[in-house]
Amino acid sequence: PVGLEGMTIQMLEFLSTVLLNSDVQSLVYEMLSPFLTMITGYMLVTSDQEDLWVRDPNQFVADDEDESNLHSIRNAALNVFESMVDIYEEEAVETLLRIVEELLLKGGDCQVNSVDLAELIQGGQPKQIQCSLREYFHFTSDESQRWKFRELSSMIIGSLSDKIIEMVEGGELPIDINILIDEIILKDLSSDSQFLIGRSFWTAG
């Protein structure tokens, strides 16, 4: 990729590299929530991606799995997420789950309910998100666009599912997996959006 997309990918790849430095890790830890929130802002489906997926639905999932698409903004951002989960473990996962909650709120309205993180994260009161997604995402009243927030929330959960399950089974992350399944996968399977249905199957797989 060239232009702005290529520069963004290079920036995200650079972040993955500098996170190996212990001094950088300490700095990022102090602003973990806004840092992860900022990166999430680069991952929403673009109009060009949506147009491509409408013309070729098979490309929807292929974009995430095809080796030829490893250098995409979304996959570069997911690599940063995975690095941060490896470094900060349950604190990074809990922060990402709270970001997922805001994505569900943005994509929900009356159609679906958002995850209640007071129930989801059972070990005490959730920390406040220091930097809201609203600083990075423009709220849209166009319901035809709100599926993008739910799609991204499902993608984040699906990409980190192995780590989430591992941490839950190890007692490091006190969450109820059934709530995640009910609120994201099962509800999106009954959606009117073919993209949400497809993403739900991908996440469940």
Image (cartoon, rainbow, N blue to C red):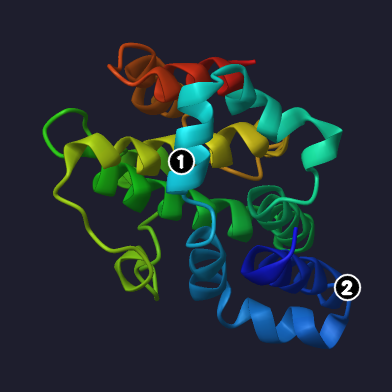
- Residues 119 and 93: in front is 93
Q: Evaluate whether residue 114 shows in this view.
A: no
Q: Quadrant of the C terminus?
A: top right
Q: Quadrant of the N terminus?
A: bottom right
Give the SS element for disc 2.
Answer: loop
**Cα distance between the residues tagged 2 and 1:** 26 Å
Q: Is residue 21 above or below residue 47?
A: below
Specify the amino acid type for callout 2: Leu
Q: Residue at x 78, y 69 (%)?
A: 10
Q: Which residue is mark 1?
A: 153
**Label placed on residue 20:** 2
Q: Quadrant of residue 60?
A: top right
Q: Quadrant of residue 133?
A: bottom left
Q: Residue at x 37, y 44 (%)?
A: 149
In percent of width and height, residue 135 lies at 33, 73
Q: Residue at x 23, y 35 (%)?
A: 144
In the rendered picture of this protein, how many numbered marks are placed on residues?
2
In percent of width and height, residue 117 lies at 35, 45
